[in-house]
Image (tube, helix red, strand yellow):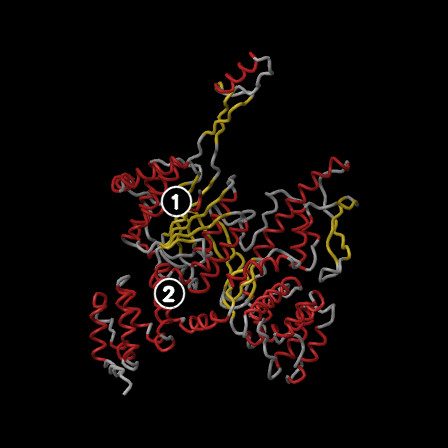
Amino acid sequence: MDGQAPEAAPLDAETLAERLEALVYMVLSVRRSVKGAAAELARFPRPAQDRFLRALELVRTTSDELAYNFCMFAPPALARLDAPEWDEWVLHVMGRYDEGGVLAAIVEMQRIEDYVRYVRDSRTGVHLHEVEGLLGRFVQGLDGRELRIAADDAAWTDTETLHLPPVIGRLPDREANFALYKAMAVHLWAQGWFGTWRAPLEEVAESWPDPARALERLHHLERLRLDACVARALPGMARVLADLGGGAAGLEAVPGPWAEAARDLARPDATLDDSLAWLPAAYEAEAAPAAPAYQGVLRPERVRAVVEARRLRERGALAEALAALAAELAPMRGAPPEGRFERLAVPDPARPEGFRVELALHGEVVVPSPEVRSLLDSIQQDLGDVPPEYLVPAGPGPYTVRAGAAGMGERPDAGPDAWVYDEWDHTRGKYRKGWCLLREREIHPGDAAFVRETLERHRGLVKHIHRTFEALRGEDRRLRRQPEGEDVDIDAAVEAWADRAAGLEAEHGLFVRRLRCERDVAVMLLVDMSGSTKGWINDTEREAVVLLCEALERLGDRYAIYGFSGFTHKRCELYRIKAIDEPYGPAVHARIAGIRPRDYTRLGAAIRHLTWRLGAVEARTRVLLALSDGRPDDQDGYRGAYGIEDTRQAVLEARARGVHPYCVTIDEEAMEYLPHMFGRSGFTLVRDVRRLPHRISEIYRRIAL
C-alpha cells in the first residue's frame, strides 16, 4: 500500500438527483427535472462529481435560474476540462451571465468545444488583443481604404473590417502564429483591393444547384488569383503565404482543373471575371485543393449590406464635395460653377486597374481636395472605375439617392398620408421594390389623466430627471475682455485704469459677452404597438414615454413620437403621437394615453419612414430611438431571419443618412439578434420590464448627450 486513501465510490443517479434537487428546488416544477442531469453525472468518477456539486453551490449564490441551467448544460464540460480548467470555466460562465443574462450563459456552456480550443491555443498561441496594434499599423501601410480589425470565430471581411480569430495557436511557436495572423490580414485586404467583391457573389452561388459548393470552389479560385497578386505587390508576404500552404504548390497532384487554373489566374491582368470563368470546371471537379490556414471564409451576405450602404453614402458625399469644389474654382477661372466634371484615367501601376481617376472641369485639369481624392479612390476600389454619373455636382438635397426605400428622396404617389417602401429580401440579396405600403394614422386619444397619474406615481424619479437634465442643458458662457458686450468686465476695467495712470496703452476689451451654447438634437421615438405588448407591458411602455418626454422637455431637444404596428406588407401603420414641432400639452398627453396594442411588428418600414422624416429636420444630431418588446414579426413571413435582416438593412440605410438608430428592448432573447440588427453598441436590454420607466431617461442621456 502507498498510504493513500482509496478514491470514494461514485454517487449513484438517485443520490445525485437528491443533491441537485436540494440546490435548485426553488426553480423546479412539473416540467422541470434534474433527473436527466443526475443520470449523466452518475457516469463520472467521484472527484468529478464533487467538483460539479461545489461549482453548482457557487453558481446558486448568483442565480437559482442559472443554477438549474448549469445542471442541464454543464455536464459535457466536466468531461472536457481538468480540475484547474474547470474552475476557470465556471467563473467564465458566471461572467457571461453578468454580461448577458441566462441566455448568454447557456450559449457559452453549449460552446464548450470552442472554449477548450481557446484554452489549448492560449498556452502556445497568440491572442489578437496582444498583436492588434501591430496588425493595425501593418494594414494601414497597405493600399486602399482604412480597415478596422475585430475578433470573430473565423477570418473574413466585410470590406471595412478584417475579422480575425481571437487567438491562434495551431502552429508550434508564437512567431509562426503571428505570421499566420499577418497572412490572414493580407488575404482579406487583397479581396478588397484586387476586386473579389465587385460582383454579387451570393447571386453567383445561388445560380448553382449547391450554392455552398459553388461558393467554396470560387473561394479556392480567388485564393489562387489573390496569392499571385500578393506575390507581385508584396514579395515578402508571398514567401509567408507559401510557407503556410499558399500559392500553386502541390496542385498538380489534385485531380481536376486546379493546376491549369492556377497558371491562368497568375496572369497580371487576371480579374474576378477569370475566376468566374473557371468556376464551372471547378464546381464539377471531384476534389478541391486543401485550404491554406489563412484562407478563412466568404460571407457575401454581410459584404452586400456594407458595400451598398457605403456606395450610397460615398456617391452623395462626392456629389456634395464636387459642388463645393466647383464653386471654389469658379471665381479663380472665370467659369460658371455648374457642370459635370470630366473623368481622366491617369496611368498608375500601383493600382490593380493600372490607372487612377483624376478630374477636369471645363477642359482644365483640377487638383481634388483630400476629401474628394479619398472618395474617388474608395469608389474606384469598389467599382474598378468612377462612373460618369458619379461626377455630377449636387447639394445635400437633390442627391439623396434612395437605397431600398421609395420615399427617401421623394415621396411616391401613394395617396394621402401613404408611402411606398422597398424591403430587403436576404434570401435573394435584393430589395422587393415598392413592397411595403405605409400609412400615417391618427391615434385614438385616451384619458389625459394617465400622464398626470404617472408623474405622481414616479414623482421622486421625476424630480431626479428634472435636476439631472436641467444641469445638462446648454448654459451661457461668459466671454471676458470683449470689445463689446452686455456687462462691464470689472477686472479688465481696473487694469485699464491702472495702465492709463501709468502712461501705458489701455486695454480695449472691457466688456463681458454671454455666448449661448445651444444643443442641436432631433429625436424620433418609435414605440412598439404590436399585440405582444398587451397588458401591463403596454402600461409600462406608456409610463416610459411620459418620463422620456419630461427629460426631453427639460433638455430642450426637439422630438417626435410615433407608434408602429400593422398587418402584412400591405398595411404598415405609423400612429402620430407627437409631431416634431408640436408642443407637449394636453393633446399629446391624451395620445400617449391612447397607445394600445394592435397587430404585428414590421420594424424595417417604420425605421425607413422615420429616417426620411428625420432627414427633413435641420439638426446636427439625429437620433431614432426604438422602444420594442421583441423581434420583428408579421403574418406574411416577416419573421425569423427575414425580418431580422430587413431591419438590419434599414438600420444601415439610416446610418448612411446620418441618423443614429438605437433600440431599447425587453426581450430576454434579444442577445440572439439585436447585436446583428443594431450593432453591439446600438441597443440596450432591460430585463425587468418594470424597470423600463426608471431606465429610459438614463438611456437617452447616454446616447444623445
Residue 457 to residue 654: above or below: above
Crowding at dot 2, Cα within 10 Å, few <14 / some 14-19 / many 20+, comes out as some
Residue 442: mark: 1
Residue 303, numbered circle:
none
Secondary structure found at label 1: strand
- Front residue of 71/449: it is 71
Q: Quadrant of residue 85?
A: bottom left
Q: Is residue 281 above or below residue 534?
A: below
* Number of marks present in the image shown: 2
Badge nearest the viewer, 1 or 2: 2
Residue 161 location in percent, x, y? 56, 59
Q: Decide: few, some or many residues near mark 1? Use Cα within 10 Å; few <14, some 14-19, many ≥20.
A: few
Identify the amino acid type marked 2: His
Could you give the CA–CA distance between mark 1 and mark 2, rounded to whole angstroms?
Answer: 50 Å
Q: Nearer the viewer, residue 425 or 70?
A: 70
Provide the residue designation for mark 2.
Answer: 92
